[in-house]
Image: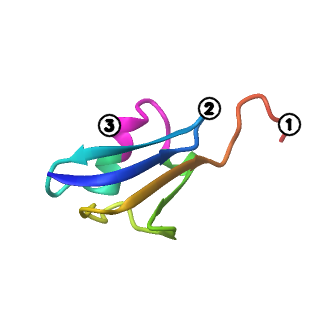
Amino acid sequence: MARILFVNNDGGGFADYVEVAPGTTVEKFFTQRIAGRDAADYLIRVNRQPVARDYVLQDGDRVTMTPTKIEGAAA
């Protein structure tokens, strides 16, 4: 298992260390953590850098998910 820091900036936001299975991609992690949402509506970074959806998470990574569209905000 890899231990990563997950920073969720959706809503109230939080940060916590979580364990992920070996071979977990950013795409799989997103669907596990933010079910029912479209990844295209989020800025997803690993270690402060944008990554491809098939990036495999490594021990010590810092994953940040920030919505690019805020519900109720004027467009």
Q: Nearer the viewer, residue 3 or 38?
A: 3
Q: Which mark is residue 32?
A: 3
Q: Earlier in the sequence, mark 2 or mark 3?
A: 2
Image quadrant in which you'd find residue 16: top left
For label 1, the residue is 74
Q: Nearer the viewer, residue 66 or 71?
A: 66
Which kind of residue does numbered mark 3 sit on? Gln
Which residue: 41% across, 48% down? 6
Separation of marks 1 and 3 at Cα, in angstroms: 29 Å
Going by the picture, which residue comes out furthest to the right?
A: 74
Which kind of residue does numbered mark 2 sit on? Gly
Q: Residue 74: x and y, percent? A: 85, 36
Q: Residue 10: x and y, percent? A: 58, 38
Q: Is residue 51 above or below residue 30?
A: below
Q: Nearer the viewer, residue 46 or 72?
A: 46
Separation of marks 1 and 2 at Cα, in angstroms: 19 Å
Which residue: 38% across, 37% down? 33
Task: Choose mark 2 or mark 3, whichever is in front.
Answer: 2
Asked if disc 1 and disc 2 are in contact, CB closer than 8 Å, the reply is no
Q: Which residues are magenta?
A: 30-38
Image quadrant in which you'd find residue 12: top right
Q: Is residue 15 above or below residue 71?
A: below
For label 2, the residue is 12
Local packing at callout 2 (Cα closer than 10 Å; few below 14, some 14-19, many 20+) is: few
Q: Residue 22: x and y, percent? A: 14, 55
Which residue: 32% across, 46% down? 29
Separation of marks 2 and 3 at Cα, in angstroms: 19 Å
Q: Judging from the image, what secondary structure is the residue with disc 1 in?
A: loop
